[in-house]
Amino acid sequence: MIHVADGVHLARDLATEPGKNMYPQAFVDVVKAKFKGVKNVDIDVLDVRDMKKNNMGALMGVGKGSINDPRMLVIEYKGADKDVAPIALAGKGITFDTGGISLKSNSGMWAMKSDLSGAAAVAGTLYAAAQRGENINLVGVMPLAENMPSQDAIRPGDVLETMQGTSIEIMSTDAEGRLILADAVYYAQQEFKPSLLLNIATLTGSAARALSDEYAAVITRDFELSTQMMDVGKRSGEHVWPLPLHENHFEQIKSPIADIKNSGAGNPGASIGAAVVGTFVDEDLAWVHLDIAGVDWLDASKDIAPKGSQGWGVRFMDQLVRDHANK
């Protein structure tokens, strides 16, 4: 389990570092240095020029307000035969979240340095699996952006064009995680043809209000898959509880001036966030959405973690990886 512990520590370190120090390129630099010398790993970094080529308007849009350009970090671990489809893990990497033009209140904003916890957990999971030489193919996709207000920042009412071609009306610039994930999950499918896609994000306060800090929210199109994820959570010690995803949630996010809108679609907020991301996931693909907003940062220590960043998701995803590697 030492490699899992190393992965958790990596995730905690990334989420604890002040936002001034942990901007998108800094995240890339830290993770690349950590993976130096690790076997069977390929690392690719998409910069703004690459994003423009791929028409990643959602990811670029979120990053426009910052002097620190967005990045997409892609780590591919090849531990099985090359004809075996990989598992793809996509993690939200907002290196600091002011809310953008839809500015958050000051109360608690300091903790938004940890809004990259999803991406950090993906990096930690890939590190653990690669270090022990797990018999599996894995891809980690980490869209990274700093959500800042400036004269260049996107505004509520703007429309962004995504890699998929779907347009998104911005109702709130503080619903930015689903925007960067939209381009990330679509890219993962197009480039790697995964057998399973899991995305993990500190996405909504709604998930935290519904489940507190006992459970992360798991949302899927297939309830049987949700129950399987509950079992993974029980065995890993990182528990999840299902929230619904109804066809009406996809109706609620329709926009009068674009294909969909990123928020402002009413209740329930966690399911609406999942519906936005799910718009960019093939309906035939096994897809797991984890909303870790209530569990990623705790104000009191636990038996297995000090207060602060929990590195939540590394143990959960590592258990999922082990399960699939043993099939």
Image: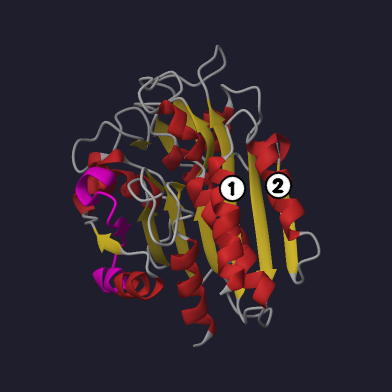
Q: Position of residue 312 (x, y in %)?
A: 44, 56
Left or right? Give the position of 289 relative to 51: left
Residues marked 1 and 2 touching at CB (< 8 Å): yes
The residue carrying pointer 2 sits among few (fewer than 14), some (14 to 19) or many (20 or more) residues within 10 Å by Cα, namely some
- What's the magenta region? 208-227
Which residue carries the number 1 mark? 13
Q: Residue at x 67, y 64 (%)?
A: 76
Which residue carries the number 2 mark? 30
Q: Position of residue 271 (x, y in %)?
A: 26, 48
The residue at the far bottom in this view is 327
The residue at the far top in this view is 151
Q: Residue at x 26, y 31 (%)?
A: 264
Instruction: Please tell me whether mark 2 sits on a helix, a strand or a loop.
Output: helix
- Between marks 1 and 2 in the image, the one whose residue lies nearer the viewer: 1
Instruction: Please tell me whether mark 1 sits on a helix, a strand or a loop.
Output: helix
Q: Residue at x 40, y 19 (%)?
A: 103
Q: Which mark is residue 178?
A: none
Left or right? Give the position of 225 relative to 130: left
Q: Nearer the viewer, residue 101 or 165?
A: 101
The residue at the far right in this view is 37
Above or below, 128 against 268 in this view is below
Above or below, 105 against 61 in this view is above
